[in-house]
Image: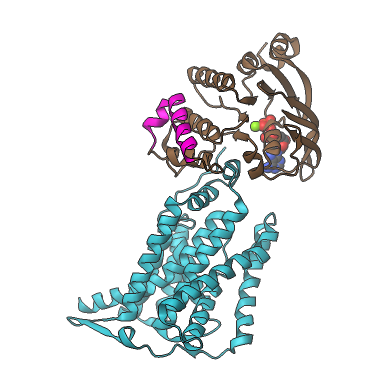
Chain colours: A brown, B cyan
Amino acid sequence: MLEITNLNVHFGVIHAIKGISLTVNEGEIVTLIGANGAGKTTTLRTISGLKKPTSGTITFEGNDITNLDARQRVKIGISQVPEGRRVFSTMTVLENLELGAYLRRDKAGINKDYQMVFERFPILADRKKQMAGTLSGGEQQMLAMGRALMSRPKLLFLDEPSMGLAPLLVQEIFDIIKDINDKGTTILLVEQNASMALQIADRAYVMETGKITLSGTGKELIQSEEIKKAYLGG
Amino acid sequence: MEQFLQQLINGISLGSIYALIALGYTMVYGVIKLINFAHGDVYMLGAYIGYFCITNLNLGFFPSLLISMLVCALLGATIEKIAYKPLRNASRIAVLITAIGVSLFLEYGTMFFVKPDPRSYPPLTGFMAKTFRVGNLLITSQQILIIIITVVLMIALQLIVKRTRIGKAMRAVSLDGDAAQLMGISVDRTISFTFILGSALAGAAGILVGIYYNSINPLMGTMPGLKAFVAAVFGGIGIIPGAMIGGYFIGLVEVMVSGYGNSMYRDAVVFAILIIILIVKPSGLLGKETREKV
Ligand SMILES: Nc1ncnc2c1ncn2[C@@H]1O[C@H](COP(=O)(O)OP(=O)(O)O)[C@@H](O)[C@H]1O
Ligand SMILES: [Mg+2]
């Protein structure tokens, strides 16, 4: 579904992404793990069209999308829950969801999807009229996820959805991610919480200072000695 | 007391003009963090367009107002496209210098075509020439018109920004440009639209000032532009209601200082207020203190 070949990204002289290639197949949960500063966020931002690569190609469903802008990428079904949630703080929960459906015109479908989001995240239904900035961290994460779902993505990126959340909530978020995937959305998940991510992932890539150093199925990597030492705390 | 009420009416009229201009400053700042120094000149052009509609085309006030707003809107979008868009990734100082360049270009370009001498709006007739007396208060119909039109425009602006799709996009871009792009919002289109809105309001302010003070000239945008900028900063730059409050506040201060003190100190007091805000509450009256996020 998504294929990245030889992607290079620079910030001025900093070579942040050094020729990575990765694939996400339809229906999968693929996770990209790695230490802080490895280049995971930059990778997602580049695929979403927020950052221009210096070289390399990105194809989605067989079409080269390297030169599409961010808006066109949303239109063809790529959506992102960015790192740090990035909800629109002085807009209401409902307005945030509405913006998630910005490119859609099917009013009836949008209304149905509000219901879908509210069923998945009942707390958002209670907080509909509240400013997004007044929500707790976990609620904001849910809002960011609901907002991303409102575009009806085929492929959903999540950038560190567990960051800063209490363990119980982390479990809940991962259950929801699994469920979103079960309902047909392909997922590329970036995480520092490697053990949780590897448990739900079909396949995984490990990133270190701009390069992909390891890849395999979630099960394989969870067993791998290297991974255990570096990311799973022993 | 009567004198105070009289000054209040004068202050609100003048403040309306500042508020209309300040809205453009604040909205543009909100979406691209640019202080558009050419904004005061769009206001000046609004005054001239109104002048030509009324004197050369013999149009009434309201058609002239609409044309003035429309032409300024197009002009604002054009300025953005030609001067600022190519600098989207340039340093802020480069964009600021460009804005000053655009301002000078508009001022002296206009001077080339219309000559530097001030022109007078034609004398008003009919309703527009009336003055109403309430007790000992004098209210001119221009003042009534300025106040009502400003309120109508502000309500319209609020509706656009709060209710419409593009208005919500504007707020989203000003809150978080990257997140807005992830929603599929086109930042370029949103910026164009913001210039269109702000410039239309400046155009309205221009023609209103024309009928209020009669005299217009190619450099008339400089001082009100600066004061409207002070008004925007006073209210909290980037915040729409802040610009409204700031505009009225600056207008009132100016009129009160002239009325009760000495009109020579009028401008000094306005800029002293700017300095005090910048010291006491840099983010302005309605602004939130922003801390760097991790
Ligand atoms: N806006 C930026 N400007 C300059 N360097 C950046 C920027 N964003 C990221 N980087 C650099 O790119 C590298 C990868 O960062 P990032 O993608 O955020 O890593 P991760 O998400 O894996 O923690 C880091 O060295 C970081 O300093
Ligand atoms: Mg990151």
Which residue is found at the position 40% from the left and 27% from the top? A123
Percent position of residue A109, x then y: 49, 35
Residue B83 position, x and y percent, is 67, 66
Report whether A43 appears left or right of B257.
right
* Residue at (73% x, 22% y) in the render: A206
Quadrant housing the N terminus of chain A: top right
Q: Is residue A171 above or below residue A137?
A: above
Question: What residue span does the magenta drawing correspond to?
Answer: A107-128
Q: Nearer the viewer, residue B216 or B292?
A: B216
Q: Main secondary structure of the magenta part?
A: helix
Does B269 lie within the magenta span? no
Question: Is residue B275 visible to us here?
Answer: no
Front residue of B253/B228: it is B228
x and y, in percent, of residue B217 in the image: 52, 85
Which picture quadrant has residue A64? top right
Check the picture and name the quadrant holding the C terminus of chain A.
top right
Picture coordinates of residue A149, whole percent (x, y): 54, 32
Q: Is residue A132 left or right of residue B73?
A: left
* Image position of B108 with respect to B270: above or below: below
- Asked where in the image residue B8 lies, by quadrant, the reply is bottom left
- State which image quarter holds ligand 2: top right
In this view of the protein, can residue B81 be seen by the observer?
yes
Residue B259, quarter of picture: bottom left
Q: Is residue A124 above or below residue B90?
A: above
